Structures are given as C-alpha cells and as structure tokens.
Image (cartoon, grey):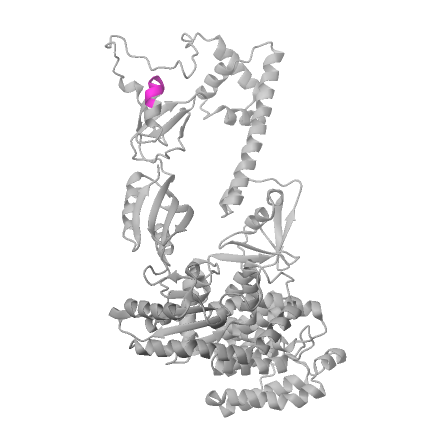
C-alpha cells in the first residue's frame, strides 16, 4: 500500500498542464521498445519485485502527467529511460543509478518525496536523486553554463561523482535527440554548452568515446557545413584509408617481427572534431594535415629492456619511412614531469602522406592511459591541480574491471571545492568566494560602494544580517542605504582581503577627514585669540596628553570627546611655561648622533644611542624596509630616511653596504624589545622538480604549521623544473627557519632559501 502522505495529490492537476505532459501516441508506441532495451542492458542487475514496483510508480506518474517536457518538447519519461539504458551500455549497469535516473523526474514533478524514495529504495538512491535535483535547480537560475564558476558549482552541488556521470550520459542522449530540431538557436546553445562543460568532464573522467561523440555532435550543430564536408571526405576515402593503414602496417609488422620484438600495432583515424582542430591549427586541407593517421606500437618487454627495445622499434620505423625531425618527441630519455613516457615520430608514409607513430611499452601505455599522465593534461588542457589528482582517481575507478565501478564510487565524497562557496545574484550572475564568506563580503565583492553602503540583504527571499555566512547556491540581493558607512567592527565580520582592505581604507580616509576638521577647529579658536599655531608645540602637547599621534588627537576634538576650549587653554598654558632650549632643526642628511661629554674623538656610542623596537615601544616613527622584510630575531639596523622616518633593515640587506658607505651618520644601532606579537612577512624561494602534487605538499606543510600563514604564491615552470616564490607570515626567524627545514623534506624540492 502506498503512503498517501508521501505521494503528492496530483490526481486533478490543471487540464492544460496535464495534457501537455501526457505522452503522445507516438511516444506511447515507442515506450515498450525503449523499456525492453533498458531491461536487456540491465538484465544482470534486475530484481523482479523492485522492477514491478518501479513500473507501477512510473505508470501512475505517466497517467497523471507528472513527467514534464524539456525545452525541446521531449518527455522526461522517454528521455530518462534512454539515459538509463545508455548508462548501462556506455558506463556500467548499476541498480541504484538506474533507479535514481528514473525516479528523479517523479520527485522533480512533486509526485514523489525524497523521504519516500529513501524509505522504499534506500539512502544511496535518495542521495543521488537529491544531487540531481540540486543540479537541476542551477539551470533555473538563468546563469551562463559556459563559465568556470558554473562548472565548479556543478561539481560542488552534485555531491556524488555518479551524479556527474549521469548528467554526462543524459546530455549525450539529449544531443542525439536534437539533431535537425527546428529550434536552431536552442540547439546551438546546448551544443556549445555540451562541448565546453560536458565533453571536458567526460574527458577528465576517462569516458573518451562519450567525449568524442559530444565534441563531434557539437561541431555538427554549430557548424553543420564543416562537419558534413569532413564527414563526406572521410567516407569517400574510407576504403582507401583502410587500405593505406594496412599497407603502412604490414611491412612494418614484418620488420619488427624479424627483430624479435613482441608487440601490438593499432591504427586509427582521428575524430571529425580533432581533424577540424588540426585543419585550423595547421591551416591546411584534410589531405595534407599532420597526424590524420595515428599508429601506436605497444611493445611487451621486461623493464630492463624497455628503452633499448623502444629505440630498436624507432630505428626500424625511421629506416622504412622518412621522419620529420622537427616533429620528433623523445619522452623516454627525459620523461615528462607528469610521468608520461613515449617516443613520437611523424613520418612520410606511402604516397608521401604524414603519419604519426607512437612507440611505447605496455607499462608506459598503462601509465599514459591510467596513471600520472592524465590524458587531458597531456593534451595541454589547463585545470586546477586539486582537480587533476581527484579526476585521476575517478578514472582509475571507472576502469577497474574486478569490481563494479559504480559500487566503488558510492562513498566517494565530492569535497574538492569545500573551501569555496558559489552564490547567485537575482539576475543569475554567479560569483565565487572563499568558504566562510559573509553577506558583507559579497557586497564588497560586487563593488566597493555597494559594500560601504550595505545594510543587509535578502538571501533566497529571506532577510539576513551582514554577518550571514553564505552557502553554495544562495541567491543574494544586497540592500543599501546612502546613510550607511563602514564601521570598525566590520573588520571582524569579513573574511576576504578585498573587503578588509576597503573597510580599513575607508575608515582611514574618514579618520583623516575628521582629523583635518579637528585641526581647523583648534586653529580657528587660536586665531580668534590671536595666538599663533605652532606645529612643534602642538606635537609636544599631544604627547604630553598621552595620545599616540596627532591624528588621534584631532579626531577626539572633531568627535567632541575632547573640548576644543580646554585644549586651547592647555596649549596657552603649555606655551607660557619655560622650556628647555629648542633643539636646532637639521635635515636627515645633517643628522648625526652626538657623543657624550668626555668621550674619545672617535666617539663610541652610549647605550642611549641604541634604537629599541617592538610592540611596547611608543613615540618612535619607524617602518620595516620592503627591500629585505626583516622579522623578529633578524640582526637589524636603523636608517634615517629623508622624510625623517627610521627604516629598519636586515644586517644582510642587499642595500646595507651602500647605506653604510654613503650615509654612515644616518645609521642607528638597533635591537628588538620582546616579540612583535603579530605576523611579519617573509618571502621564500623554492626550486624543485615539476612533479604533480609537489606544490600541494608544500602548501599543506605551511597551512599545518602553527602561527604561520600563506599570503601569496607564484610558480614558474620550465624544462621539468619549477621555481616558486612563497610569501608567508611568521612571528620570528626561528619559525621561518623551522618552516624552511620542513619544506626541504618534501620529495622533489631541491632548494629552499629566504629571498633577499
């Protein structure tokens, strides 16, 4: 008996909606054959009782018009059956995946609840259905699927790799259905999206045949004339092409056998999409492009003879056919940094046609197909390092033949983007922010003025405060007010550096304006009393009253926390008191520390001449030099700049020698007073082998290190080596030296040093 509480009451939907969703006579006629095909594909995993119950639910849903139609007018039911069948044939038969595909549209149509699915078919099926529903909701936001952020959000929303594979297979089914569909613009949009998004994902997952079909159909729907021309030319030449490949391979096979090699030779013609790309790149016609034919020689040989046997096969090929030296690629002597090993030669075969020959051993072929050398990376397609290794693991699971790949993927958690959130604007624009970002972060991400005037927002139609933590998929509308301005406590709300910088900048600008107003107020009062405003005297008064600087002092006046009349009276009283003789004003160039009375002529400096720096030192205007970035614990010295600010340099600063030689009278002996407390910046230079994962290992060490933060990273790679510069925040040089020692232990790292 069905649970009435879990099945939505759709017995009497609006007539027009029900009629629109009901199957046509043609669709009804094709349904038995479609379902029979699915049953044949899923025969080995069929459970009679579950199959009967599933048919009952689907039949009732179809009768009540629950299965909606997509934008092309195709019934969700027939498309779901075709997708389930294609999944069994193209990927792997799997009971839970088939159930998820067929039940998804019933839940999407509000006919069946997730709770009912979990109760009757299990939590695993419900998990996939939930993922499909979340992903389907993305397309209702009006955002552009041909964007990197959409792809990332898609991966984050799916929550299960099987959901992504279902979507790829479903897109393949849809692409086949829309051939010659009259809605040309919609067909073109789907084709572009399929090539950009789904073909790319299929390639990374190792679903190469699906990837090639999606690419070919995408070209067919976006440029049918080009596709038809290439297909026609290939068909016209098929017999001739097959004969050509046979003619190329036959003598080569005999020659290789005569050398005692145990091998396999494969010959193929590349896909229409691949040929089209080569025509554009090489700017030639189909008869003269490179690599139209590809021959692969795979040698079975023990490890100790791999290189010698590959070079032996190379000599056989080049003796028989004239090679093109400029197209020769030797990745056996020096393998690629990602582990790829192979010899590639382009030779002039019979009739002078160019043919690419790849020579590798069985082990090398397995590495190229399944191991470190992910095929898409080998083709030069760029992606994120995290996604690289993750996708390789997925492809290994797909190619596992001993156990069902879908079973291995059941608990494979998709958390590759758990450090990011993706949110929408009401117009459907998609933005990426770090995990933990607030509504206020998003406002500043949109525009500085929007952030500065933000008062709150509506998230998914509900009013939220500035402190609301964003979640992937949220639709956010920012609310602003012209009377709003940044507050000091906003610094503690935001997590992004952009928002924090803009808030501090605005607060500082506002503080400076306020200070100017306070200065004018004091100057006006003094002028009314015909008292001269002396900057030096005011500065002394400020320090005597306990303020850190004049900006804070004038701010207090402007804000009314300090009475300007009281300040004026203090100033007059301060000026009337006898003072010590005014020090003679000298420029920085003329400045020199005076020796104590009775010292020798050369003047050894006393303890008073030592500059002490640290958190507990106040009233000294000093800055850390950017040329050497000193940190606590470094040997340092002070240098009085032309502006009167003391610049703190490391003793081994690249500019130290020039400073001491040219301006010895402006150099001050300096030492630290206690730890600074906050992190200080330092830059590390790292050199190592350009191996997959090495950068991830280095950054992992930094993030795990206590009181150390990674601020910036830049990497350059060349000829199998990489050179990187890491900007880190540390508290002292002991922490930095400990970090350097740990990074040196990473496999592949050759050198770590502190940048000057």
Q: Nearer the viewer, residue 77 or 313?
A: 313
Report whether residue 127 is seen.
no
Q: Report the number of numbered marks.
A: 0
Quadrant of the image occupied by residue 246: bottom left
Tell me where residue 174 appears, x and y as whole percent: 61, 75
Direction from residue 6 to residue 368 in the image, left or right: left
Q: Is residue 329 among what the camera can see?
A: yes
Q: Which residue appears farthest toward the right when viewing the image? A: 16
Say which quadrant the N terminus sits in.
bottom right
Query: Where 213 falls versus 661 (above or below)?
Result: below
Main SS of the magenta part reads helix
**Range covered by the magenta-colored residues:** 660-666
**Residue toward you, 598 or 518:** 598
Residue at image coords 65%, 57%? 426
Q: Nearer the viewer, residue 587 or 290?
A: 290
Above or below: residue 51 compared with residue 575 = below
Q: Is residue 726 magenta?
A: no
Question: Is 639 drawn above or below residue 436 in the view shown?
Answer: above
Q: Where in the figure is residue 86, as x and y percent of width and height?
A: 54, 81
Which residue corresponds to the image point at 53% horizontal and 18% vertical from the top-left? Answer: 567
In the image, residue 96 lies at what x, y percent?
A: 49, 81
- Please tell me which residue is depicted at 30% across the width and 54% down the height of the picture: 746
Q: Position of residue 374 (x, y in %)?
A: 42, 66
Left or right for 88, reference 258: right
Could you say which quadrant of the image residue 624 lies in? top left
**Is 524 on the left or on the right of 390, as rendered?**
right
Residue 333 drawn above or below residue 632: below
């Amino acid at each position: 008996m069905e649970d009435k509480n879990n099945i939505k009451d759709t017995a009497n939907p609006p007539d027009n909606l029900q009629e629109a969703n009901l199957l046509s006579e043609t669709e009804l006629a094709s349904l038995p054959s479609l379902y029979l095909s699915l049953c044949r594909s899923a025969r080995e995993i069929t459970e009679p009782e579950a199959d009967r119950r599933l048919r009952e639910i689907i039949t009732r849903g179809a009768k009540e018009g629950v299965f909606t139609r997509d934008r092309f007018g195709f019934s969700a039911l027939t498309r779901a059956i075709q997708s389930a069948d294609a999944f069994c044939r193209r990927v792997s038969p799997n009971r839970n995946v088939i159930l998820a595909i067929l039940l998804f549209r019933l839940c999407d149509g509000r006919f069946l609840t997730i709770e009912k699915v979990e109760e009757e078919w299990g939590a695993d099926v419900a998990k996939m259905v939930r993922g499909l529903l979340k992903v389907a909701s993305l397309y209702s936001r009006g955002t552009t699927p041909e964007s990197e952020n959409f792809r990332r959000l898609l991966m984050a929303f799916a929550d299960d790799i099987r959901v992504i594979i279902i979507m790829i297979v479903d897109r393949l089914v849809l692409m086949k259905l829309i051939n010659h569909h009259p809605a040309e613009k919609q067909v073109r949009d789907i084709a572009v999206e399929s090539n950009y998004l789904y073909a790319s994902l299929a390639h990374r997952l190792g679903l190469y045949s699906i990837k090639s079909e999606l690419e070919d159909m995408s070209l067919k729907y976006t440029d049918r004339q080009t596709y038809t021309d290439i297909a026609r030319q290939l068909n016209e030449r098929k017999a001739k092409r097959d004969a050509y490949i046979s003619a190329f391979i036959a003598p080569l096979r005999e020659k290789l056998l005569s050398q005692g090699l145990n091998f396999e030779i494969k010959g193929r013609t590349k896909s229409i999409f691949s040929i089209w790309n080569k025509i554009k790149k090489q700017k030639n016609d189909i008869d003269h492009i490179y690599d139209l034919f590809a021959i692969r020689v795979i040698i079975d040989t023990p490890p100790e003879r791999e290189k010698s046997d590959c070079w032996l096969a190379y000599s056989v090929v080049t003796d028989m056919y004239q090679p093109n030296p400029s197209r020769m690629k030797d990745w056996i002597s020096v393998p690629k940094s990602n582990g790829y090993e192979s010899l590639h030669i382009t030779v002039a075969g019979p009739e002078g046609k160019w043919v690419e020959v790849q020579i590798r051993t069985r082990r090398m072929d397995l590495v190229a197909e399944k191991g470190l050398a992910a095929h898409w990376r080998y083709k030069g397609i760029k992606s994120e390092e995290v996604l690289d290794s993750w996708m390789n693991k997925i492809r290994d699971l797909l190619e596992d033949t001993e156990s069902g790949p879908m079973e291995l993927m059941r608990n494979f958690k998709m958390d590759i983007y758990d450090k990011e959130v993706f949110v929408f604007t009401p117009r459907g624009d998609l933005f990426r922010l770090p995990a933990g970002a607030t509504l206020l972060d998003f406002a500043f991400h949109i525009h500085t003025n929007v952030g500065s005037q933000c008062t709150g927002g509506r998230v998914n139609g509900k009013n939220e405060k500035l402190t609301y933590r964003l979640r992937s998929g949220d639709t956010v509308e920012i609310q602003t007010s012209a009377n709003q301005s940044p507050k000091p406590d906003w610094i503690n709300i935001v997590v992004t550096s952009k928002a924090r910088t803009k808030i501090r900048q605005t607060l500082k600008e506002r503080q400076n304006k306020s200070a100017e107003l306070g200065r004018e107020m004091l100057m006006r009062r003094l002028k009314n009393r015909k008292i001269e405003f002396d900057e030096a005297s005011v500065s002394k008064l400020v320090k005597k009253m306990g303020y850190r600087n004049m900006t804070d002092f004038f701010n207090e006046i402007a804000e009314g926390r300090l009475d300007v009349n009281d300040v004026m009276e203090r100033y007059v009283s301060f000026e009337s008191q006898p003072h010590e003789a005014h020090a003679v004003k000298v420029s920085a160039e003329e400045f020199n520390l005076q020796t104590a009375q009775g010292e020798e002529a050369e003047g050894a400096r006393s303890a008073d001449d030592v500059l002490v720096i640290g958190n507990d030192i106040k009233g000294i205007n000093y800055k850390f030099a950017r040329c050497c970035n000193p940190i606590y614990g470094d040997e340092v010295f002070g240098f009085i700049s032309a502006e009167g600010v003391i610049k703190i340099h490391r003793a081994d600063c690249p500019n130290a020698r020039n400073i001491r030689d040219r301006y010895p009278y402006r150099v001050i002996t300096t030492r630290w007073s206690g730890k600074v407390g906050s992190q200080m910046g330092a830059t590390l230079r790292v050199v190592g082998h350009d191996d997959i994962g090495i950068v991830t290992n280095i950054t992992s060490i930094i993030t795990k290190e206590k009181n150390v933060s990674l601020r910036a990273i830049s990497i350059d790679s060349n000829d199998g080596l990489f050179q990187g510069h890491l900007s880190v925040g540390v508290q002292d040089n002991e922490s930095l030296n400990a970090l350097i020692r740990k990074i040196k232990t990473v496999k592949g790292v050759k050198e770590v040093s502190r940048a000057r």
